[in-house]
Amino acid sequence: MLPPFFKRLRRQGVPTLAAWSASVLVFMAASAAMGHEGHDHGAAQVAIPETAAGVVAEIQKHHGAITAAVTGKNLKAVHDLAETMTALAKALPDKVPVEKKERVQGSTTTMTKMLDTLHHAADAGNQPRAGIELKKLDAVVAALEKQVN
Ligand SMILES: [Zn+2]
């Protein structure tokens, strides 16, 4: 049963608004489910550079900041940096020439998974695990630099 508000909308010929509202609610629920320990995930706001080289430069910058956070035992800083770096990694495959796309896609998918593991280790305050994951991330960032440049 639809609430009276939606029934009235439908009578007025605007059924799409109700459908739109429902999909927004579903989206919000999905986002909330990604959060843990009192904070949300998947809501990174980041300006994506136009070019592949620009995106790689931002990935390198965030990699440097994450390295500083982990080695400086400042794990709380990892959350935001990892989310932003994930958004950058996901944007990269569409910006490289078509002949590079498949390999770059492979690297960024691996990178995204590592960032997720590192992020959760950091959120949990697990310094040894964060250090191990950071080393893996170093390797995939180095591989990606070679693939793009
Ligand atoms: Zn987190």
Image (cartoon, grey):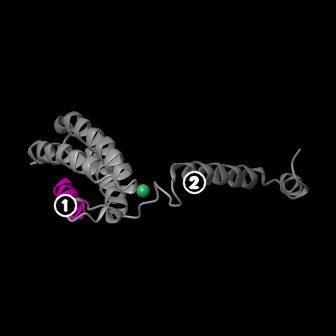
Relative to 121, is 106 above or below? Answer: above
| Helix, strand or loop: magenta stretch | helix
Q: Give the quadrant of the N terminus.
A: top right
Q: Where is residue 26 drawn, in percent x and y? A: 64, 48
- Boundaries of the magenta span: 50-69
Q: Helix or strand or loop: what does disc 1 sit on?
A: helix
Q: Name the residue located 14 percent from the left edge and 43 percent from the top edge.
A: 139
Task: Using the numbered discs, state the Cα–Cα distance from disc 2 to disc 1 in whole angstroms.
Answer: 30 Å
The quadrant holding residue 65 is bottom left
Q: Mark 2 = which residue?
A: 32
**Residue picked out by circle 1:** 71
Pick whichever, 95 or 134, lies toward us: 134
| Quadrant location, ligand no. 1 | bottom left
Residue 93: x, y in percent?
A: 26, 44
Residue 15: image tag: none
How many neighbours does mark 2 have within 10 angstroms: few (below 14), some (14-19), or many (20 or more)? some
Q: Do the residues labelled 2 and 1 touch (CB within 8 Å)?
A: no
61 relative to 31, above or below: below
